[in-house]
Image (tube, grey):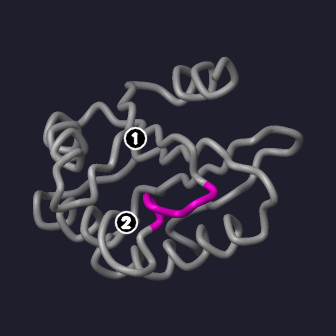
Amino acid sequence: MPTYTVEKLPGEPIVMITAHEDYDPSEDAKEAVLVVNTILDELDESVTFIQDLTLMKVDLDDIMVGADTTGRGDEATFHHPNIREIISVTQDPIMRNVFEGMGSSAYGNVRMLVVDTLDEALAYARQH
């Protein structure tokens, strides 16, 4: 069974990845980035990218692997030209701090909004 789900919401400029409880960044992040990037490559519009991480159980090493995979390198999803905005959904204080740190030059100045619930993320994305 997949450890994550990726979808383009029908009729909306939103692409979303949902990490399931058994998602392991060190095992799954590279594949997930490829899947997301494939969807983004096929789009003819810019979208809001939502990553729902509310179910993930991770430690700091997992978070750093995920941040490196999505924020740095040639395949970095967070720098894809079809992403106009990134929203992360988590209540984990460590993840929130790491996401704020991704605004540094080491990660290419990734800007993202961090919210507590998927409902908040979707409401924001639909308004902007």
Does label 2 or label 1 sit earlier along the sequence? 1
Q: Position of residue 113 (x, y in %)?
A: 39, 31
Residue occupying the point 14% across, 58% down: 59
- In the picture, measured across the screen, residue 35 lies left or right of residue 13, that is left
Give the residue at mark 2. 70
Residue occupying the point 57% across, 52% down: 83
Foreground disc of the pair 2, 1 = 2
Which quarter of the rendered picture does the N terminus lie within? bottom right
Numbered label tally? 2
**Observer-nearest residue: 18 or 13?**
13
> Magenta region: which residues?
77-82
**Observer-nearest residue: 60 or 128?**
128
Could you say which disc has been placed on residue 15 in the image?
Answer: none
Q: Amino acid at mark 2?
A: Thr
Q: Position of residue 88 (x, y in %)?
A: 41, 40
Which quarter of the rendered picture does the C terminus lie within? top right
Could you say which disc has been placed on residue 54 in the image?
Answer: 1
Q: Position of residue 16 (x, y in %)?
A: 61, 50
Mark 2: few, some, or many residues within 10 Å (few <14, many ≥20)? many
Instruction: Indicate the quadrant where residue 127 lies.
Output: top right
Residue 128 drawn above or below residue 99:
above
Q: Position of residue 9 (x, y in %)?
A: 77, 45
- In the picture, measured across the screen, residue 45 lies left or right of residue 111, that is right
For label 2, the SS is helix
Residue occupying the point 16% across, 61% down: 106
For label 1, the SS is loop
3D distance between C-alphas at marks 2 and 1? 17 Å
Residue 11 drawn above or below residue 121:
below
